[in-house]
Image: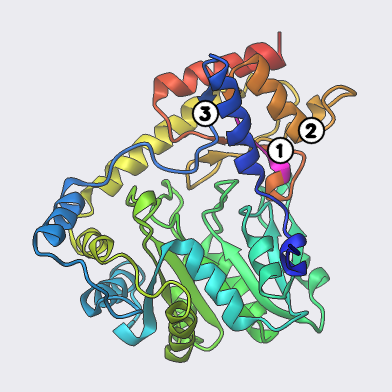
Amino acid sequence: MKISDRLMQVKPSATLAVNAKALELKAQGREIISLSVGEPDVPPSAHIGAAAKQAIDDNFTRYTAVPGIPELREAVAGYFNRFYGVDAAVENTIVTNGGKQALYNLFQVLLNPGDEVLIPTPYWVSYPAMVQLAGGVPVTVAASAEADFKISVKDLKQALTPRTRVLLMNSPSNPTGACYTREEMDEIAAWAIENGLFIISDEIYDQLVYAPASPAGLAPWWQSNPGQVCVVNGLAKSFSMTGWRVGYVLGHPDLVKALGKIQGQSTSNVCSIAQKAALAALTGPFDALDTLRTEYARRRDIALDIMSGWKDVVCPKPDGAFYLFPDVHRLYNDTIPDSATLCTRLMEDAGVALVPGVAFGDDRCVRISYAVSEETLRDALGKISKVLFP
């Protein structure tokens, strides 16, 4: 059997490798605390589950239209109307099997072989692989901890070539939690539009932004430039619905039709029951979001306070998501030369699982998730401290 050339160029997931090592140690009887999980530790609001149960009782279990049931697509448009003040309509939306499918399909729709995609780095692990699987070329644009892990127009100009077709933005960021300000995002968007680029804005964490920061989504730029901007979002992070697999796209009607074409030939519709749950999430009360933001901000501050005593470790204060991305490269030595080795050492000696920064394109760092209880967070960071600073 011969595996395709395009798949051979894609690297295995480093996050899965971390999980496999953790499972191996657990099988040996070791207690492992995971700060590697990228999902909320709280359940969805009760009305969301109730809507799913009602869908089952109503036998709403048959195929639906590929882009989603009309009332859910209308709710997606309403979400952008409510939070970003744009005039979105049903034909501007499509519902996907998670935000990941939305991104994968977008690259399939937008890229021809050899087209380049600018990806601010650190990046979410799947971005480069998705671009490669679409025949594109990922071009990383590096940002440092000293720059709060945010790129500038100056950085982008240096990476621009005649082959550049797409700019991918992610704010708040996975893995850094960095949030661009309105002014920063507007400057980048204006530059990209002027240079004829298409902008994909991954805003899956848009409701997890902590005061005094505020979301700086690109829906207003979509409104004024619908042929060059689209927004990807979903219910996994802000609504604690990771396993429900519901994402969505705001875009030009022609783009939506193209996405529907590829989705119709791959997965067809999102689970009908999950669509009813998503409808409840997007039209129901949003009170839980305030509680979630308050709690995550509190845990972030607890973690940063503990980490402030870690000598030679630099960690910007993130304004969103639920990750910390400390720069730990000054701790490297002959026996711990990189982030993967450091994470292996911490798992074996401290019993704590983190994700190495190399998985996100920055080997100087490690990713820490604080989507765990305060007790677990304090325990894990304390164990890390004892290993790194005995």
Tell me what residue is drawn at x 59 percent, y 65 percent: 169
Q: Magenta part of the protein: which range?
A: 353-358
Q: Does 338 lie within the magenta span?
A: no
Q: Which residue is pictured at 74% across the width and 81% down the height? A: 113
Q: Is there any visible trace of residue 18 in the rendered image?
A: yes
Q: Which residue is mark 3?
A: 34
- Viewer-nearest residue: 126 or 239: 126
Q: Which mark is residue 365?
A: 1
Identify which amino acid the numbered label 1 is placed on. Answer: Cys
Q: Earlier in the sequence, mark 2 or mark 3?
A: 3
User: Dot 1: what SS?
Assistant: loop
| Of the image marks 3 and 1, the number of the one nearer the N terminus | 3
Q: Residue furthest top?
A: 390
Label at residue 329: 2
Rendered location of residue 99, percent (x, y):
46, 63
**Could you say where residue 109 lies in the image, as x and y percent from the top left?**
57, 82
Q: Is residue 89 left or right of residue 154?
A: left
Disc number lying in front (3 or 1): 3
Picture residue at 38% right of the left edge, 58% below the top: 245
Name the residue type under label 3: Ser
Question: Which residue is at 15% across, 57% downward?
Answer: 51
Q: Are marks 2 and 1 in contact (CB under 8 Å)?
A: yes
The quarter of the displayed image where residue 371 is located: top left
Give amino acid for label 2: His
Per the image, label 2 sits on a secondary structure element best described as helix
